[in-house]
Amino acid sequence: MSTATTTVTVTGMTCGGCAARVRDEIGRVSGVSSVAVDIASGEVTVASTGPVERAELAAAVVRAGYAVAD
Ligand SMILES: [Cu+2]
């Protein structure tokens, strides 16, 4: 099984609740196998079983109530 890692910078997260919401929404994106959130930097590292569109990840972040910086 091939894996890919994508990193996005999320703005507006302030606590563990924010991180959990982002993690949950991104975790629902097809192919995503794990999500690691660094609240302080906003960096979210997404591991997936294949390439995942950044636009899909950004849409998931927006559904969670946050925005992608890059
Ligand atoms: Cu929060």
Image (tube, rainbow, N blue to C red):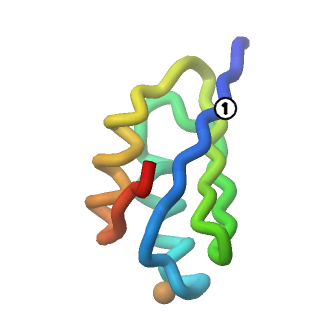
The N terminus is located in which quarter? top right
The answer to whether 26 is drawn above or below residue 30 in the figure is below
Q: Residue furthest front?
A: 70
Q: Residue furthest top?
A: 1
- In which quadrant of the rendered view does residue 54 lie? top left
Closer to the camera in the image, 50 or 40 = 40
- In which quadrant of the rendered view does residue 67 lie? bottom left
Residue at 43% of width from left, 77% of height from top? 12
Q: What is the three-letter code of the residue carrying label 1?
A: Thr
Residue at 29% of width from left, 47% of height from top? 59
Neighbour class for label 1 at 10 Å: few (<14), some, many (≥20)? some
The answer to whether 11 is drawn above or below residue 6 in the figure is below
Q: Which residue is mark 1?
A: 5
Residue at 61% of width from left, 30% of height from top? 48
Q: How many marks?
A: 1
The answer to whether 55 is drawn above or below residue 64 in the figure is above
Residue 13: where, in percent of width, then height?
A: 49, 77
Left or right: 44 as drawn, with respect to 64: right
Closer to the camera in the image, 12 or 5 = 12
Residue 68: where, in percent of width, then height?
A: 40, 55
> Is disc 1 placed on a helix, strand or loop?
strand
Left or right: 63 as drawn, with respect to 69: left
Q: Is mark 1 within 8 Å of ligand 1?
A: no
Left or right: 41 as drawn, with respect to 53: right
Residue at 55% of width from left, 72% of height from top? 19
